[in-house]
Image: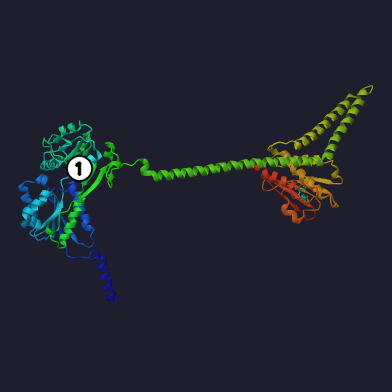
Amino acid sequence: MKRIYRIVFSALLLLLIFQPLYGAQPGEMKRVLILYSEDKTHPAHLMIDQGIEEAFRSKPGFDVQLYSEYLDVSRFGDPLHEQAMADFLRRKYSGIEFRVIITVYPYALDFLLAHRLALFPGVPVIAAVIGKSHAEKLERSGARSFVTGTILANPVTDVMDSALHLKPETKRIALVGGTAPNDVYMEQGFRQGFGAYAGRIGLIDLTKLSMEETLSRVGSLLPDTLVIYTSLLKDKTGKIYVPRESLQLVAKASKAPVFSFAETFLGFGIVGGRLVSFREHGREAAALALRVMGDESPASIPFGGEQAYVSTYDWRELKRWGISEKALPPGSTVKFKSLSIWEQYWWVILSSLSFMVIETVLIMGLFVNFHKRKRAEIEARQRQNELAHVTRVAAMGELTSSLAHELNQPLAAIRNYANAAQRFLSQSEPNLTKAREALEGIIRDDRRAAEVISGVRGLLKKEEPHYGPVDLNEVLQESLSFIRSDSVLEGLSIETELARDLPRVSGDRVQLQQVLLNLILNAVDAMDKPKPDLRKLVMKTENEQDGRVKVSVRDFGSGIDEMQREKLFELFHTTKPGGMGLGLAICARIIHAHRGSIRGENNPGGGATFSFTLPTTDNE
Ligand code: ADP
């Protein structure tokens, strides 16, 4: 059993390793040789190569092996080198069978036709990018039986029509070309085709000059002129140029827009137009090769190349010469467009902007809310203060008899002291010592009366709370002083248990007096009906362990109605017929504003105790 597993596993492994081969659905291995006229770096060759590869790769499962050779004719085109190259290829490829040979440019075709029998007898040929005259020659020589290909038509009409479409006001054409064989060949082709335009457009001949002369001539052209660049591989002085390099120099110096015929020149100074696409030529050549490999006879396949064009323009040149994109033929593409910051990053800018707007709106919303809340808080505090004031005035109203008594006492004493002083002074021998004592008594009681009045005034004054260190023992005494001699206190005993060394609290003296006064009056009320046996108030100040101070008012009255307990500190909650239900609610607000707490509870032995605690200043 184990052996079977091992065999299956090995088979799977082999399948995995060779999977690409199987995936390619191998048929017969097809070898294709591509014979290029120029060297490897020739821009048009690179594009043709790209086109050929793309076309072969687009046929999945079609197993083609490509071989490339570069004849480098511009540098080694003499018969000696040609022969050496033929010998080299014969040796290199002896024993290797090609299904098709693709030649690129006319020279490679001529080379192959000259050496085909010795090198690759019987192999069909696809001649990519040849002139019309070459194709005709093939027909005449009988080579057409094994050759088909793509034709590059004379580009003059395309160049001229593209240029005149954009610049219809053109009066003259300046023709730029060099002295190399290819330059001359291209120039002649242009001159032939130009005949059709000669009647209406003049020709300035800038061919076969030195580069220096060429540049100075194109630099002084009039605006109604166009430059046509054919080919400038070599100038009059014999200096060699790469076509793109010479084109760039000419375009830079030129005072008029430059046009040419090939896609490979786009980006090097030409405006653009209906341009020959070498990539398309490559694609078409590969498509023809596939047909031939599919056993079609080359003779029966017509030449292609009619569609190998692209309508492309250089955005920078359009800008430079003030040509609007709207003037371009429909379906044109514009390359090298440098986008504005907005065009490149519009979505980043838009999203950042919208983010900023949303953020600003949110912040503004928060700001408005914050201000509303602040205003509401201020208003609430003002209302609370007003309410506290109103209830204070009401409480003082209840205490008028007590206050009258409080004032009566010192006034009566003052009157007595004054009478006594009169007497001491009217004696035959005035008793000055006694009179002085009586006067001191007057001053003392006057001060007491003044204190009573200022206490009452303090409570009646409508002022913003003023926070400062407060001794709660003193506050308790002062509150008691308002009621000490009130008639309601008759038969009421008041006990005070004041803690020694009581730390101060931070608070508003008047408001804290009001709280105590309220608690005292409530306690007195609670002991009114039904009258308890014991009418006693126990008032205490205590030092709490957590650094707080506690003040409590204990009574022996009716106690808090359990049902009402929850609502004790709510506004307008009262169980009294004439009550307003404001006192405890105001007390709670005052104590909370002082960061303290207040509570009311029933005593185990009857009656209630209301107490509040406040943080001490040391504890803050
Ligand atoms: P008011 O005195 O106008 O009724 P308060 O807010 O001062 O308003 O008191 C609210 C209610 O709390 C009182 O009606 C009473 O029922 C209860 N209360 C307050 N203090 C005492 C107390 N010492 N003993 C029993 N009940 C009390």
Drawn side of residue 240 relative to residue 359, left or right: left
Q: Residue 533 in the image: state x and y as whole percent.
A: 86, 52
Quadrant hosting residue 180: top left
Which residue is depicted at the point 23% across and 37% down? 257
Quadrant hosting residue 102: bottom left
- In the picture as drawn, the residue positioned furthest to the front comes out as 199
Q: Residue 406 in the image: state x and y as whole percent.
A: 84, 37
Q: 429 or 389: which is nearer to us?
A: 389
Q: Is residue 382 visible?
A: yes
Mark 1, secondary structure of its residue: helix
Q: Residue 547 in the image: state x and y as whole percent.
A: 67, 46
Rendered-image quadrant of the N terminus:
bottom left
List the residue tagged with mark 1: 159
Q: 598 or 194: which is nearer to us?
A: 194
Drawn side of residue 48 relative to residue 139, left or right: right
Q: Is residue 43 above or below residue 236?
A: below
Q: 484 or 113: which is nearer to us?
A: 113
Rendered-image quadrant of the C terminus:
top right
Q: Is residue 67 above or below residue 168?
A: below
Q: Is residue 81 above or below residue 415?
A: below
Drawn side of residue 559 relative to residue 617, left or right: right
Q: Residue 210 in the image: state x and y as whole percent.
A: 13, 34
